[in-house]
Amino acid sequence: NMQGRLLMLLVFSICFTRGSFRSCPTIPVQKNFTLSEFMGTWFEIESLNTHLEKGDCITHTFSQSADNWIYVNTTEKRDNGKRILYMGKLSPANVNQAAKLQILLTEGVYMDFGPVQDQFTFIPYNVLATDFQNYSLIYSCTQHYFTPTIYAWIMSRGSQLEESTIKDLENILKTNGINIDKMQQINQKDCP
C-alpha cells in the first residue's frame, strides 16, 4: 500500500542521512585581517585536496584594481614544462569578518595561449592565519551532497618556509578536525 511505501522511504531516508551526512567544519578566521597587506605574491608550500593545480612552482599573485575587484593570478609549471595561468577574482564574503573571502576562478589558459579550462563559481576562501610578510594559511570547504570537500593551502612570501611554521599551521587545521594526511608539498625548486 502507499502508506507503507512512504513509511519505508522515510525510514530509509533517516537511516541513510543520519550516519553519513557531514557538513563543512566552521573554523575561525584571522582577526585583524587587512586585505591590502595580503596583496602581492605568495608561493604555495603545501596543499590539501587541490585538483586544479597539478604542477610545481605554484604561485598566487593578488592585486587590487580600480574597479575594486581583487584579481588573482595563479601560475604553475606542469611536468611537460608548460606554464599554466589561472585567473580569478576575490571578493569579501562577510563584511564583519575581513578574512572571510570568496574566489571566482574565471578562466585558465596555458601561457602559450592553449586551451581555456572550465569556468567555476564562487568558492569560500578563508584566511585562517597570516602575518602578511612570511606565511599564510587558507581554508576552503564546499558541500557536495552528503560530504564536504575540504581544501587548504600553506603559503609563503618566499619559495621556502620554516618547518616549525609549517607544523604550526598544520596544527591549526588538525585542532579544527581537518585530516592533513593527504597534505602535499609543492616543489618550489628550479622554478622560473
Image (cartoon, grey):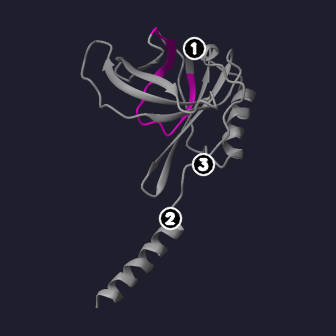
Q: Nearer the viewer, residue 161 or 128?
A: 128
Callout 1 amino acid: Met
Residue 163: percent from the left, percent from the top? 71, 27
Callout 2 amino acid: Ser
Disc 1 or 3, which lies upstream in sequence? 3
Instruction: Give the number of the disc on residue 25.
Output: 3
Callout 3 amino acid: Pro
Q: Residue at x 29, y 28 (%)?
A: 117
Disc 1 or 2, which lies upstream in sequence? 2
Residue 156: percent from the left, percent from the top? 62, 20
Q: Residues within 10 Å of mark 1 (few under 14, many from 20)?
A: some
Can you identify the residue that label 2 sits on?
20
Residue 133: percent from the left, percent from the top? 68, 14
Vertical comparison of 152 with 37: above or below = below
Residue 103: percent from the left, percent from the top? 46, 29
Residue 135: quarter of image: top right
CA gap, disc 1 and disc 3: 27 Å
- Residue 45 is a magenta residue: yes
162 horizontally vs 121: left or right: right
Q: Nearer the viewer, residue 97 or 166?
A: 97
Vertical comparison of 27 with 153: above or below = below
Q: Residue at x 43, y 26 (%)?
A: 55
Can you identify the residue that label 1 sits on?
39
Between marks 1 and 2 in the image, the one whose residue lies nearer the viewer: 1
Which region shows up in magenta?
44-66
